[in-house]
């Protein structure tokens, strides 16, 4: 399958890179907001008079609303200029951050987190299709890499930053810290985003209709297993590093930071290769990650080896979504909004299932079990990616 045979009217000249950067800032702010509670559960619970388990549901509720929004955003906003849709979700981020920071009780905290889920699902669900209209076709992987770089940085620093700010200005101050960033992203998008009139097609009515196409079904299944395997392992890296490898908290924080920086490097390194070797990348990366997962078991007590392996995990793991974003742009150029929504919903589902499955194995079988689980699932992702390639026509692996 090649993009040359599909006519897709997109903005080709000049490329709106300022708009892409503004969206990358919004993505970073969204992800930082999503994972901020991880390091602040105890003070939030104490202040609002609820248990830490209840407070942890603030993360779950945002994921649930993100799934629902990503599935239906294209249909519900089918006649609305995409510039206004993006600005609306950015405004929701501002409202969410403010509600959480000033929440008088648990109910308002959950309302604020639900609004964050709406913003995450809507913004991420439409991001690929909007990037396709902001830059030329050949620069789409580069634009997606920018978004994933913001994602990698925010996912890395959100928990330690939340903990640090919580100690200095309290948990409410930590949450409010993202509001000025959200305002900046909103204003920047207001100034930089061009008008993007809706291009509604019949395919947007039901996102699951896309799964009738074998390559799409196989690709989406591979994406689901990729994130399920990745987060089945990644979620339990901290207890692994602390109790098995035996690193100190400062060393642990350094390792996580280096993983994030490696992820940023990975997103940039992959962009050139994606133009000619798309399927080779999405097939090989899960296999490399599976090998790393197994090696982390074998070298678990050697800190330097573990640090090196996790650097590679960050490099390849963060680059993988860029590859699948490019696949989506190539495979569904006229259904990118619906396809993007379906992809985001499956990713959120996979993260939830992977983390839950890894946690069950961690408790029942031991620390090594999530690593084996992740390796097996990642091999399945690679196999499905190869099947998607075999199903495609005229694409070099």
Image: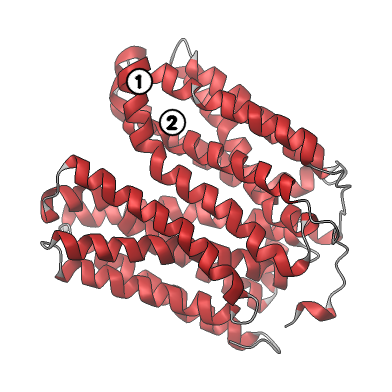
Q: Quadrant of the C terminus?
A: bottom right
Residue at (46, 46) in percent of width and height: 153
Q: Nearer the viewer, residue 266 or 32?
A: 266
Q: Is residue 86 visible?
A: yes
The earlier-in-sequence mark between 1 and 2 is 1
Residue at the spot of label 2:
58
- Is 225 above or below relative to 242? below
Please determine whether, in this image, residue 148 is positioned above or below residue 385. above
Q: Taking 121 as reference, is 364 above or below it?
A: below
Residue 263 place in picture, x, y as percent: 44, 58
- Quickly name the residue at label 1: 44
- Element type at marker 2? helix
- In the image, 22: left or right of 388? right
Please state the horizontal and vertical placement of residue 39, each as a whole percent of the image. 32, 32
**Are the two marked residues, 1 and 2, in contact with CB atoms closer than 8 angstroms?**
yes
Task: For marks 1 and 2, give the one nearer the viewer.
Answer: 1
Q: Separation of disc 1 and disc 2 at Cα?
A: 10 Å
In percent of the image, x 58 and y 59: which residue is there? 145
Q: Is residue 93 left or right of residue 204?
A: left
The foreground one among 306 and 235 is 306
Q: Quarter of the image for the N terminus: give it.
A: bottom right
- Is residue 55 depicted above or below 376 in this figure? above
């Amino acid at each position: 399958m090649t993009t040359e045979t599909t006519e897709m009217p997109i903005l080709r000249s000049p490329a709106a890179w300022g708009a892409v950067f503004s969206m990358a800032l919004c993505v970073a702010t969204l992800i930082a907001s999503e994972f901020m509670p991880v390091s602040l559960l105890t003070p939030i619970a104490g202040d609002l008079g609820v248990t830490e388990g209840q407070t942890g549901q603030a993360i779950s509720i945002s994921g649930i609303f993100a799934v629902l929004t990503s599935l239906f955003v294209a249909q519900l906003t089918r006649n609305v200029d995409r510039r206004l849709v993006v600005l609306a979700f950015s405004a929701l981020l501002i409202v969410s951050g403010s509600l959480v920071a000033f929440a008088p009780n648990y109910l308002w905290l959950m309302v604020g987190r639900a609004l964050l889920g709406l913003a995450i699902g809507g913004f991420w669900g439409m991001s690929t299709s909007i990037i396709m209209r902001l830059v030329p076709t050949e620069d789409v992987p580069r634009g997606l890499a920018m978004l994933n770089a913001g994602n990698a940085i925010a996912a890395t620093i959100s928990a330690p930053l939340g903990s640090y700010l919580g100690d200095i200005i309290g948990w409410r101050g930590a949450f409010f810290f993202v509001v000025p960033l959200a305002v900046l992203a909103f204003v920047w998008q207001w100034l930089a985003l061009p008008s993007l009139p809706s291009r509604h097609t019949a395919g947007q009515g039901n996102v699951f209709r896309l799964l009738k196409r074998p390559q799409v079904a196989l690709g989406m299944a591979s994406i689901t297993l990729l994130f399920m395997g990745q987060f089945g392992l990644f979620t339990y890296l901290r207890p692994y590093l602390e109790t098995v490898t035996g690193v100190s908290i400062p060393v642990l924080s350094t390792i996580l930071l280096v993983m994030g920086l490696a992820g940023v490097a990975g997103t940039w390194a992959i962009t050139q290769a994606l133009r000619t070797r798309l399927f080779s990348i999405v097939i090989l990366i899960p296999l490399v990650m599976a090998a790393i997962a197994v090696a982390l078991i074998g070298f678990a007590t050697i800190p330097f080896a573990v640090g090196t392996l996790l650097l590679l995990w960050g490099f390849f793991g963060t680059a993988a979504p860029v590859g699948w974003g490019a696949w989506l742009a190539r495979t569904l150029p006229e259904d990118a909004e619906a396809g993007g929504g379906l992809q985001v919903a499956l990713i959120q589902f996979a993260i939830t299932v992977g983390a839950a499955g890894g946690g069950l194995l961690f408790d029942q079988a031991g620390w090594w079990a999530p690593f084996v689980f992740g390796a097996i699932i990642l091999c399945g992702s690679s196999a499905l990616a190869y099947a998607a390639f075999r199903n495609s026509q005229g694409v070099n692996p």
